Amino acid sequence: MNPLAGLNPEQAKAVAYVGGPSLIFAGAGSGKTKVLTHKIAYLIDQQIISPEHILAVTFTNKAAKELRSRIENYVGNKVRSATIGTFHSICAQILRREIEPLGFTTGFTIYDESDQLSLMKKVIAERSIVLQGITPQNILSKISSLKSKWIEPESYQPRKGILPDLLVKQLYPHYQDALKQANSLDFDDLLIFPLKIFSSYPEVLEKYQRKFKFILVDEYQDTNKPQFMFVDMLGRKHRRVCVVGDDDQSIYSWRGADIENILRFEDAFPKAKVFKLEQNYRSTNTILKAASAVVSNNIHRAKKTLWSENKEGEPLSKIMAEDEYDEAARIASDIKVEILHAKRKFKDFAILYRTNAQSRVLEDILRRNNIVYVLVGGVKFYDRKEIKDTLAFFHLLCNPKDDVSFKRIVNFPPRGIGKTTLDYVEAFAQKNHLSLYESLAQLDSFELSPRSIQALAQFYQMVERIQSSLTTLSFEEWSRIVILELGLREYFKEIGGEEALERLANVDELLNDISKFCSDEQNPTLESYLEKVALNTQIDSWEDTKNAVSLMTLHSAKGLEFPVVFICGLNQGLLPMERDMAEKSIEEERRLFYVGLTRAKEKVYLSCSELRTYAGETKYSSESRFLSEIPAELIQVKSSKENVISASRQPRKSYFRKDVDAIKTPEQSSVAPETSQQIQIGSIVTHQIFGAGKVFGIDGYGPNAKLHIMFRSAGQKTIIAKYVKLSL
DNA sequence: GGCCAGTCCCTTTTT
DNA sequence: GGGACTGGCC
Ligand SMILES: Nc1ncnc2c1ncn2[C@@H]1O[C@H](COP(=O)(O)OP(=O)(O)OP(=O)(O)O)[C@@H](O)[C@H]1O
């Protein structure tokens, strides 16, 4: 296949421009990713650059995989030798070879958030620092934001008299020391460390400049400073760099992504050729008009044209619900209607939302309606306690200095090693400048009760045994031995009960995952598996082949497309999320909404609800200002059954109250204070026919109030208060 | 040393 | 509603 076929003239020009730096700057759905794909295929096909000299950066590992397989369609397996991955995984690969000059060994561990937190807590505790209400998480997130600007501990200038800043100044260097002692890196270090090596060791930089002769970056608008510098350092000599992005889709400024990198690109690579793509191939004209109207409210943006030859399509539908359950129920019913009348499949739908917490009600209602769905994000498989604990063994074997992992597993499953014993080992390790695990080699000189010594000795011998079997067995076989040695099966069976069995099932699932990894990978090792796990992104574990509705955050939906998209929770305060009122942040919220809208090919549903429950508190909530930014003629307000009823009661407007004082808390809105039945939102009630259910909405007052109840088996119903009994 | 129940937070988004 | 932490009990 010819990589220039199937492209419009502007796209083809962008693909064929290989002589110098280029910036492909274009709106949603204009084929940026497609150009990137074709360009790599073109480079290989025309033998302009051989594949092993190509470096392509994507936003997720999944996108990398897809890119690779699309290119393979054009040039076959030649693409195998190209380097394609996320910034984090590419940097990790480089560090596995080059990290030693920085005082780490190549078996370093990549710490996730919870590992970082344990380490930070230890750092704080060791120095008996008083935090005065500031959490270790606060400190970590500040450090992370410093790292995303590549600010080192020494050069950080705290604001005078600001406690969090002073604490960060104090703790940041100690935190880095502790990481080094544990031979571990956090996510941000993965990006910074290669830069340190490149700046201190020019010969290493040159090696990689020779290796990566052509660099391509997708989703460039969401790069941060270290990522920009990485591209700059590697590309500044040969200048064969192509970046692709859309300023309107920058949605990660909160973790250091900087749109200015687009301007900086033209500074760093003077005379860069800029390509603009203006034809959208994804969405109907109606969707495109709505999205463009919304994003044009942003001041800090480059104006661009987007047009489409696609048909006008259906108007956007607006769902006005009473609360989250109603919202979810209407979404479910619209999905059913679409399936019935428009012959769609479950997998044609995506439901997008601002916060992960919103997925719960949606899942609940979809399940009741027998709508098959997959959830992206939420509690990650690898984050489950039993999985993290098991993997901590793996980590300890790769990296005996990893104290965080040691502590996680020294008593999992329980083997009688408690706080007192551990405190002793920690003190001993500190005194002798050893890691916790290393110090077990000197168990004989420990002054502990025989029982504790015995327990530690058994643990130590087990780890050593597992360690030595690693050299004789394949990773897959070995992983099974580990589970056996740990006695996890016996442990969970002994506890018994549903939960323990579920955990055991998860451990089995981990073994399955390892087997799958071993059959997919050419050279599967313990180290490569751990790296995959550490760098796994939310979308990477999305089962996109399953015929199921996809549920995910707007952030996760970046770069994807679906025939039908629901964006829910369009309430002021939620989307846009209101935390600080800065104008900059409202623009990012708007971009997020824009990203959501432009994921849709054919149809968009937008939903909001009168009542929102936040942290157990139910409040009235007004409609999102973004809804009013869409031209009215493009929107149709869906009148479902309930909507007709409520429309006849009152003009809708009055339900979206602005005055916070008028908001009833759940406690105030009890149904019948004069009777013994104190039914409130959240009350569990029973009905003669429908059984037990939970009240999630109350209209009116007294025994004749209408209760909106979610019954355990019968689903959602509206019942007059006097026909139910309060449970308990 | 281990387990459980009660309590106190918090809640944006993620590599 | 839930996760992290604490205090009390076995
Ligand atoms: N020349 C073309 N002819 C036909 N279809 C095209 C063409 N260019 C792009 N497309 C299609 O348009 C859709 C969007 O393309 P792509 O994902 O590359 O756009 P994008 O600019 O990266 O989008 P976004 O920034 O919104 O993620 C894809 O389905 C792609 O196949």
Image (cartoon, coloured by chain):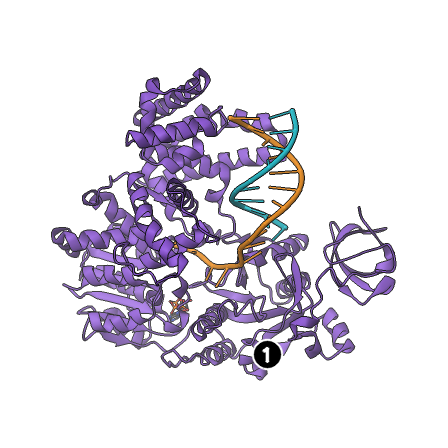
Chain colours: A purple, B orange, C cyan
Q: Nearer the viewer, residue A360 or A77?
A: A360
Location of ligand 1 given as a quarter of the image: bottom left
Q: Position of residue A470 (x, y in %)?
A: 33, 27
Number of residue marks:
1
**Disc 1 on helix, strand or loop?**
strand
Q: Nearer the viewer, residue A80 or A134?
A: A134
In the picture of the structure, the residue carrying the numbered disc 1 is A635
Indicate whether A571 appears above or below A105: below
User: What's under tag 1, amino acid-wise?
Assistant: Ile
Q: Is residue A74 visible?
A: no
Q: From the viewer's perspective, is A599 left or right of A368?
A: left
Name the residue at 29% across, 44% down: A177
Q: Quadrant of the N terminus of chain A?
A: bottom left
Q: In the rendered image, which quarter is residue A323 located in?
A: bottom right
Q: Position of residue A614 (x, y in %)?
A: 61, 60
Name the residue at 58% across, 84% down: A633
Q: Is mark 1 within 8 Å of ligand 1?
A: no
Indicate whether A545 appears above or below A14: above
Q: Nearer the viewer, residue A348 or A141?
A: A141
Q: Residue furthest front?
A: A161
